[in-house]
Image (spheres, helix red, strand yellow):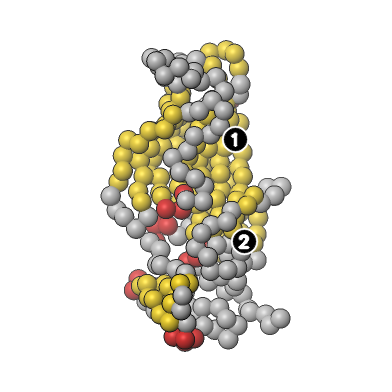
């Protein structure tokens, strides 16, 4: 079986629920952020944690405390397809991805997970809305179908619940994708965010139309997914297997600008 591999590397630069009558919040003690801890309190006990404008004070935020590794963008999902892959399971000419990942709030690494490309739609290990529960550690796309035409993506998740909502300027300054052999792939980016102000912990993601970066939000989105596409040019010419490795590097630069002055309605 002939094969060409595409390796993914990540360089990320970031500055960066209510049930019945109970509220779950992450309490971040002033001056001691390393002692952040989850507390479940009554609605009446929530009042000391609120500012006059109704925001949580200091670094507190709704929901369980999030590991520091998941604050800022982090790789969280992948997908691939190829219009030319064979649907015959007995053939070895197929495209697939091997990846390692961790579950949120767990340290154990799950290795050598595999998904195969589909012909008519992207195949992903989990949905976009559930991808915030996972963190990719490494990804390798193995393209062994004969004809060029592979499409794949890497998702980068941002869980903004750890940022004091409503009082910051959040900016994605620049997104750069570099490939060792750029002549065979075209890269692009899509952004999906949950811009709701409620305390629901289920992401409701919708596409954000933008002409390019920098892109600034006047408050911290609850959730965002930045999807980096790599599209191989479609051709009837077989792949160049002499160049059998092509490394993709994604660089995401974002920042959060201070606490803005709150404004009364």
Identify the residue at the far top of this view.
237
- Rendered view: 40 above or below 200: below
SS state under label 2: loop
| Residue 212 in view, yes or no | yes
Q: Residue at x 35, y 36 (%)?
A: 113
- Rendered view: 41 above or below 179: below
Query: Where does residue 195 sit, x and y in percent of width and height?
Result: 62, 61
Q: As drawn, is 21 to the left or to the right of 176?
A: left
Q: Residue at x 61, y 64 (%)?
A: 196
Q: As drawn, is 13 to the left or to the right of 208?
A: left
Query: Where does residue 220 sit, x and y in percent of width and height?
Result: 58, 65
Label for residue 195? 2
Q: Residues within 10 Å of mark 2 (few under 14, many from 20)?
A: some
Q: Quadrant of the N terminus?
A: top left
Q: Residue at x 28, y 50 (%)?
A: 108
Query: Where does residue 213 sit, x and y in percent of width and height?
Result: 65, 50
SS state under label 1: strand
Q: As drawn, is 263 to the left or to the right of 113?
A: right
Q: Residue at x 40, y 49 (%)?
A: 135
Residue nearest the viewer, comparing 105 with 199: 199
Q: Which residue is mark 1?
A: 187
- Quadrant hosting residue 150: top right
Work out whether mark 2 precedes mark 1 in sequence or the reverse, and give the earlier one: 1
Identify the residue at the far left of this view.
108
């Amino acid at each position: 079986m002939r094969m060409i591999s595409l390796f993914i590397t990540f360089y990320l630069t970031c500055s960066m629920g209510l049930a019945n009558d109970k509220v779950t919040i992450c309490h971040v003690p002033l001056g001691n952020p390393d002692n952040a801890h989850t507390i479940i309190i009554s609605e009446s006990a929530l009042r000391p944690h609120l500012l006059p404008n109704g925001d949580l004070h200091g670094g507190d935020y709704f929901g369980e405390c999030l590991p520091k590794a998941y604050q800022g963008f982090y790789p969280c999902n992948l997908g691939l397809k190829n219009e030319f892959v064979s649907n015959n399971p007995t053939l070895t000419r197929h495209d697939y991805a091997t990846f390692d990942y961790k579950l949120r709030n767990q340290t154990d690494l799950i290795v050598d997970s595999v998904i195969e490309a589909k012909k008519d739609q992207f195949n992903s290990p989990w949905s976009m809305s559930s991808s915030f529960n996972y963190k990719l550690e490494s990804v390798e796309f193995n393209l062994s179908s004969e004809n060029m035409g592979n499409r794949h993506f890497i998702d980068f998740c941002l869980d903004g619940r750890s940022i004091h909502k409503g009082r910051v300027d959040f900016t994605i300054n620049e997104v750069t994708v570099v490939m060792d052999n750029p002549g065979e792939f075209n890269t692009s980016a899509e952004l999906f965010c949950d811009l709701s102000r409620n305390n629901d912990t289920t992401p409701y993601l919708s596409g954000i139309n933008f002409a390019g970066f920098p892109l600034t939000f006047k408050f911290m989105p609850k959730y965002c997914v930045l999807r980096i596409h790599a599209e191989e040019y479609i051709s009837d010419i077989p792949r160049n297997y002499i160049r059998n490795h092509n490394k993709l590097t994604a660089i995401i630069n974002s920042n959060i600008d201070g606490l803005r002055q709150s404004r009364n309605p």
